[in-house]
Image: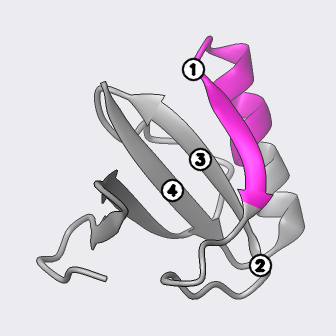
């Protein structure tokens, strides 16, 4: 399983995504956004999964794959 960090435009969207992950049995936690990653609302959802789940009612700003303290924007090649 891989570790991911998802950022959001609002706290409501972060909570909606977090609740969805918990309901589907995915290990997740709400946390402050890491300093290396910027975010509109300052709250992220850290989770472990085999891939990024598609969540219909959540406005995700960005999803980063976390590897050895570095964050890789999913859908892009940028290292942070």
> From which residue to which does the magenta span run?
17-31
Question: Label 1 near label 4: C-beta < 8 Å?
Answer: no
Q: CA distance from mark 4 to mark 1?
A: 13 Å
Q: Which residue is mark 3?
A: 46
The disc, 1 or 3, on the residue closer to the chain's N-terminal end is 1
The x, y position of residue 54, in whole percent, is 44, 41
- Residue 59 lies in magenta, yes or no? no
Q: Quadrant of residue 31?
A: bottom right
Q: Quadrant of residue 74?
A: bottom left
Question: Could you say where residue 60 lies in the image, as x and y percent from the top left?
Answer: 57, 65
Q: Is residue 26 magenta?
A: yes
Label 3 Cα crowd, 10 Å radius (few <14 / some 14-19 / many 20+): many
Indicate which disc residue 7 carries: none
Q: Is residue 26 left or right of residue 20?
A: left
Disc 2: which residue: 42
- The tag earlier along the polypeptide, 2 or 4, is 4
Q: Which residue is mark 4?
A: 5
Q: Considering only order in the chain, which callout, 1 or 2, is on the residue closer to the N terminus?
A: 1
Instruction: Tell me whether circle 1 and circle 3 mark residues in contact (CB < 8 Å).
Output: no
Residue 26 marker: 1
Image position, residue 29 (x, y; %): 72, 39
Q: Are marks 3 and 4 in contact (CB under 8 Å)?
A: yes
Tell me the CA gap for discs 1 and 3.
10 Å
Q: Quadrant of residue 12?
A: bottom right
């Amino acid at each position: 399983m891989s570790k991911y960090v998802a950022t959001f435009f609002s706290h409501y969207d972060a909570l909606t995504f977090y609740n969805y992950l918990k309901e589907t049995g995915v290990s997740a936690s709400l946390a402050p956004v890491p300093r290396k990653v910027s975010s509109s609302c300052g709250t992220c959802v850290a989770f472990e999964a085999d891939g990024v789940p598609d969540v219909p009612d959540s406005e995700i700003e960005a999803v980063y794959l976390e590897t050895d303290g570095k964050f890789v924007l999913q859908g892009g090649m940028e290292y942070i």
